[in-house]
Amino acid sequence: MRITWNTDEFQVHDAAKRVLQVITDGWSDCTDPPSVAAALANLTTGPSDPTLTISGTTSGLTVPTVRLTAIPLDGGSRTEFNYDGFIELDSSAYVIRVDANIRMFIRVDGPVRFHDTEPDQTRIEFGRERPIELAFESRIDDGDESIQLEKTPAAVARGLTTLAAGAETTTPDRTWPTMRTAPPQITFGAETRIPSAVADETPETGIELTVPPDLAYLLPSASLVYYLGADVHTQTGCDPHLTVADRRVQLGTGQAYETAIAKLLKRVFYLDCVARTAGPHEDHLSVLTEVDVLNLDIEQLYEAPLATRVKQYLDSQFESVADVFPPWHLTMHLPADYQTLETIPHFVANVPFFVTPRSTTLTEAAWLERASAPEYPTQSTVWRPESGFEPRSTGPESSLTPEQSPTPSDVTTEADVQLRQTSSDISTVDLVEPEYESGRTHGWLGDGVPLGAFTALPEAYRNRSKYIEEPDAELAVTVVANTTPPDDAGRGSGVFERETTAITSQYESEAAGLDVNLTLKQSLSVSELARTFKTKTDLVHFIGHHSDDGLVCRDGAFRGDSISTSNAQTFVLNACGSFPVGRTLVERGSVGGVVTFRDILNEDAVRVGAAFAHLIMNGFCIQRALAYARGQAMMPKDYAVVGDGTHVLTQNNSIVPIGIFLSENGDGTVTMTVEQSAPWICGGNIYDPNETRDDLSHLFGTTREYTLDTAALPEYMDGHHGPVIYEGTLHWAEGIIAHFSDD
């Protein structure tokens, strides 16, 4: 990490190009500050040996509006500041944790005051100039240990047992994302080798998993094994089962086994989230009142060994309260083979469900029906997290015209409704429809190309590490406008110009805050486009055409397999049927990106491209950004993600950015549904200023619904950078504020 100063402001940069901005009330050097490292060494939060610290004297700091936690060093109760209001602390000694995209820890002696200023800023005031010391912690996590396994089920079982070396505790605090780090990477060789450092870090929890010697049973268990610290054994002819103390839990066979594994993980993980509220990171989760019926002694559970907790959870009636917890964030569909097994360490700290890929081939008619289904609610529907779209019972239709999202009836030129293609032969793919069970987001490593899931490739996860750079590197974004194909010069040029302008303006608007280096290239040749993908870049956004031969250039077509290495971390290929090129780019070195399956309308391309640019630069992962952006298209699922759909290019200060659904009720109020989930993170919690109780928090993925007076909306929307789905149409906060302010 590094720090850059501009008078009394500084920015902290990490190797993933995340940025934390802090404004000081004047800053001067000091020689004897209170030690933040010494304080952290005695706490259960933050780095015990921080790699970057600074000290100085100041009377206050302004930080992003995120969760702040004041931790008294005398062992007293912690104080949470959750976005708004005013809190004053006494003269005790504190570490103040700022949970931004780069975590900051402030060692200061009180008194201290917290209060909100701007919608996206919080003030920390010390009353007078005081010496302080700051430490910083990056959220980058890339396991640096590895194990070598023989290609046998017994060796794989031994390797899976070591996955738990990545978890930093066996208490319920392991539900916090920061307490689950990457386990050792898996390689294969002539003999099995487990380094002593890995063996020493592998906990003995007293929990055992016994399965037949078959990868089809071993691989789906990986997240559960990681979380439970289970010792894995293979036994020919056995019935798969989990042993916890003196209890044996039968898990079934085949698909029933996978379902049982997923249900058990959800039960143990979410009830551990409940138990952790009795620990030092105490908070009042919104689900606590719902789980009272289970009669859990959370104080006793917090102190209990993992096996004891699991046994009590198994005895509880979790099924009666399961629906109050968020839907599981991610399900990965993985074939049971040794190549896939090498990707497991990249996933398990995020505890996804693992299932065997099962699918059916899509007919043309089925494809058209699925591809045209709405991505988010229409004006006649309302979205519910537990059941999807339901008919709307009340409320008028929208009176707000989308600013950047014209409907098909707004399109007035022939070029707007033309397909973005250069010939009648467009590259297509053979799509399959996966069997979806639990999970909000799905990744697919099976055969065929899935509808509705991102096409994960093993290379995507291996490629991620090469983009962890020195923290002084800028966020390099290149927009390529190859918009004049030789066989239809001038056709739709107005649409392409509007798209280029919309895309570049979105990236330019984020340039200052994210240290973006934006480059616009137009009408490239094949060799120039190849050089663009070979150059180290964080995002390449291609606007243009695709033919059977590849992405159209002024002198031919670019094929992904024409380069040996792609150094574009992510990409958008906004051209008809671009999936084959995108897949090859990931196989050659990229992490992931947006592609299309078939023909797309020019106007859809403008809307989807501009919205995606806005969202990816505001902390949305590739899959979630596209899910919102493509909802504007007539055929939303013509757009898809290839590679790692959970990849985040820029980190939002809220960690998980917010999406909002609005519908008017016809009585001067609106129903507001707040969606705050992400497939790359599980177990954290969030606060919402709409709550009347300041200390009430929600688990990531919890969907909240509120009824607000329309007059209150502008204030709530001020500072919101995510999408707003108002009566079935995508908007940004500025338009919502203007509309309801006028009312």
Image (spheres, helix red, strand yellow):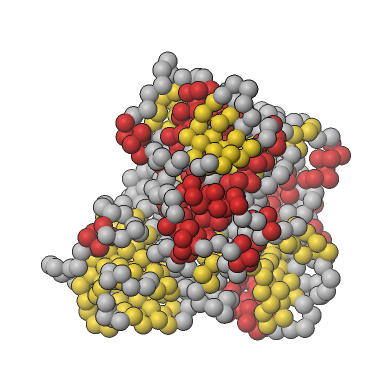
> Can see residue 431?
no
Residue 574 location (% of width, % of height) = 64, 44
| Relative height, residue 475 to residue 124 (above, below) | above
- The residue closer to the viewer here, 467 or 694, is 694
Outermost residue, top direction? 190
Outermost residue, left direction? 31
| Relative height, residue 655 to residue 200 (above, below) | below
Residue in the image at 48% along x and 46% along y? 307
- The residue closer to the viewer here, 404 or 317, is 317
Side (left or right) of 631 relative to 680: right
> Can see residue 278?
yes
Residue 82 location (% of width, % of height) = 47, 73
Residue in the image at 53% along x and 72% along y? 696
Location of the C terminus by quadrant is bottom right
Quarter of the view holding residue 375: bottom right
Residue in the image at 75% along x and 57% along y? 388
Residue 214 location (% of width, % of height) = 60, 24
Residue 539 location (% of width, % of height) = 51, 45
Residue in the image at 79% along x and 80% along y? 666
Outermost residue, front direction? 246
Quarter of the view holding residue 437: top right
| Relative height, residue 209 to residue 32 (above, below) | above
Quarter of the view holding residue 94: bottom left
How many discs mark residues in the rendered view? Answer: 0
